[in-house]
């Protein structure tokens, strides 16, 4: 069994974090989520985007 200190927790971005990273208004990100272009994780009332997912989108040149 792994100790807690050995576990790696993946960073997640909020709408605000992603807005700054992509220089895009939060409302535009919400529209992309509503249209299914972005798929966030919903943790109760919180919405988060796994950093690995965001990097994959960036490496692919964006989303369509």
Image (cartoon, helix red, strand yellow):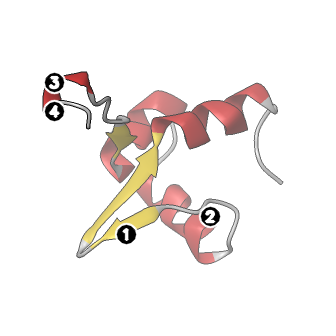
Instruction: Please give the residue where the numbered disc 3 appears in the rendered image.
Output: 5
> Reading the chain from its start, which is encountered first: label 4 or label 1?
4
Q: For the residue carrying disc 4, how many other residues have a C-alpha within 10 Å: few (<14), some (14-19), or many (20+)?
A: few
| Distance Cα–Cα, label 1 vs label 2 | 15 Å
Name the residue rendered at 37%, 42% in the picture: 13
Q: Which residue is mark 4?
A: 4
The residue beneath circle 2 is 32
Q: Residues within 10 Å of mark 1 (few under 14, many from 20)?
A: few
Name the secondary structure under disc 1.
strand
- Image quarter where the C terminus lies is bottom right
Residue at (62% x, 59% y) in the render: 38
| Image: 30 above or below 61 | below
Q: Residue furthest left?
A: 4
The N terminus lies in which quarter of the figure? top left
Looking at the image, is mark 3 or mark 1 nearer the viewer? Answer: 3
Give the vertical position of 40 relative to 53 (above or below).
below
Give the camera-side residue of 17 and 5. 5
Q: Determine contact: label 2, label 3, CB under 8 Å.
A: no
Q: Nearer the viewer, mark 1 or mark 2?
A: 1
Q: Position of residue 24 (x, y in %)?
A: 52, 42
Dot 1 corresponds to which residue? 42
- Marks 4 and 2 sit apart, C-alpha to C-alpha, by 36 Å
What whole-number distance in Å separates the C-alpha atoms at marks 3 and 4?
4 Å
Mark toward the viewer: 4 or 1: 4
Res 18 → quadrant: top left
Compute the Cα span from label 4 to label 1. Answer: 24 Å
Image height of 8 relative to 25, above or below: above
């Amino acid at each position: 069994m792994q100790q807690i200190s050995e576990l790696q927790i993946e960073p997640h971005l909020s709408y605000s974090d992603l807005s700054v990273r992509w220089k895009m208004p939060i409302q535009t990100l919400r529209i992309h989520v509503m249209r299914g272009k972005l798929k966030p994780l919903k943790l109760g009332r919180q919405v988060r985007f796994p950093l690995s997912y965001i990097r994959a989108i960036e490496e692919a040149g964006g989303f369509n």
